[in-house]
Image (cartoon, rainbow, N blue to C red):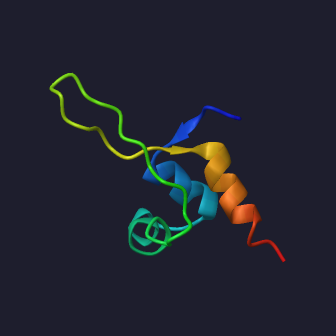
Amino acid sequence: MSTELWTVEEIAQFLKKSKKSVYARVINVPDFPRAIRLPSEKGKRGHPLWFAKEVIDWVLKYQR
């Protein structure tokens, strides 16, 4: 499994959508891969990240 992590911006580029559209219409789809949040040095959780392979596999399952 690929370990490359994508941000919302990278998912938007891959899908050829705006970042706003990805936030509003893609990552909220029930079967979209779950994000991970790595801890920051201040103990807070960082920005959401997704495994690139999981996002690509999700897109491909909707291929007709």
Instruction: Decide: is 28 above or below 45.
Output: below
The picture places residue 6, in percent across and down from the top left corner, at 52, 43
Residue at 44%, 44% (x, y): give it.
Answer: 49
Locate residue 17: give its quadrant: bottom right
Instruction: Decide: is 8 above or below 1.
Output: below
Residue at 38%, 47% (x, y): give it.
Answer: 48
Q: Is residue 15 left or right of residue 24?
A: right
The C terminus appears in which quarter of the rendering? bottom right
The picture places residue 47, in percent across and down from the top left corner, at 32, 43
- Is 47 in front, or is 39? 39
Q: Is residue 48 left or right of residue 31?
A: left
In the displayed orientation, state which residue is furthest to the left. 42
Locate residue 46: give its quadrant: top left
Q: Is residue 7 left or right of residue 15?
A: left
- Is 43 in front, or is 19? 43
The picture places residue 24, in percent across and down from the top left corner, at 39, 73
In the displayed orientation, state which residue is furthest to the top. 41
Residue at 54%, 63% (x, y): give it.
Answer: 32
Number of marks drawn: 0
Q: Is residue 19 left or right of residue 53?
A: left
